[in-house]
Image (spheres, rainbow, N blue to C red):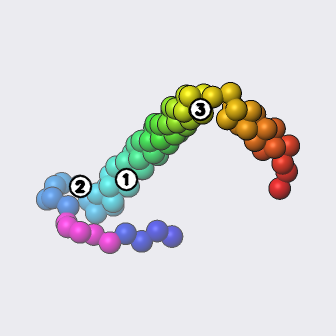
């Protein structure tokens, strides 16, 4: 059972109390569906943002390490092999 607290009364109308409650419940359901759709869109945007950020920082790190010369690239290669073979 859901209990809702009112912040204000409904405007005067010809609706019965039951019709007013049903009308408000329909509006609440509509707003909940809209909120779920917006939450899904936000999750998608945040996911895309994180993916883009990681791609940019990965490319930047590759450029920095590449600028340090082939010796550092060898270290990175061995580190990648270690990280791929390591199992927790």
Where is residue 35 drawn, in percent x and y? 41, 47
Q: Are marks 3 and 2 in contact (CB under 8 Å)?
A: no
Q: Can residue 46 be seen in this snapshot?
A: yes
- Prevalent SS, magenta region: loop
Which residue does the numbered mark 3 point to in the structure image?
68
- The residue drawn where x is 37% and y is 53% is 28
Q: Is residue 59 magenta?
A: no
Most foreground residue, 35 or 31: 35
Q: Is residue 53 left or right of residue 88?
A: left
Against 9, is 42 above or below? above
Q: Earlier in the sequence, mark 3 or mark 1?
A: 1
Where is residue 10 drawn, in percent x and y? 20, 61
Which residue does the numbered mark 2 point to in the structure image?
15
Where is residue 38 drawn, in percent x and y? 42, 41
Say which element carries label 1.
helix
Disc 3 or disc 1, which is closer to the eye?
3
Most foreground residue, 12 or 55: 55
Packing grade of label 2 (10 A; few <14, some 14-19, many >=20) is few
Q: Which mark is residue 28?
A: 1
Q: Can residue 84 be seen in this snapshot?
A: no
In the figure, residue 11 lies in which quadrant?
A: bottom left
Most foreground residue, 21 or 37: 37
In the figure, residue 37 lies in which quadrant?
A: top left
Magenta part of the chain: 5-9
Disc 1 or disc 2, which is closer to the eye?
1
Q: Earlier in the sequence, mark 3 or mark 2?
A: 2
* Label 1 – label 2 distance at C-alpha: 18 Å
């Amino acid at each position: 059972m859901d209990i809702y607290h009112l912040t204000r009364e409904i405007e005067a109308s010809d609706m019965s109390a039951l019709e007013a409650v049903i009308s408000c419940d329909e509006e609440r359901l509509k707003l909940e569906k809209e909120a779920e759709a917006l939450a899904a869109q936000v999750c998608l945007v945040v996911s895309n943002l994180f993916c883009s950020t990681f791609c940019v920082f990965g490319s930047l790190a590759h450029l920095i390490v590449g600028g340090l010369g082939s010796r550092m690239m060898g270290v990175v290669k061995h580190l990648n092999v270690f990280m791929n073979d390591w199992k927790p």
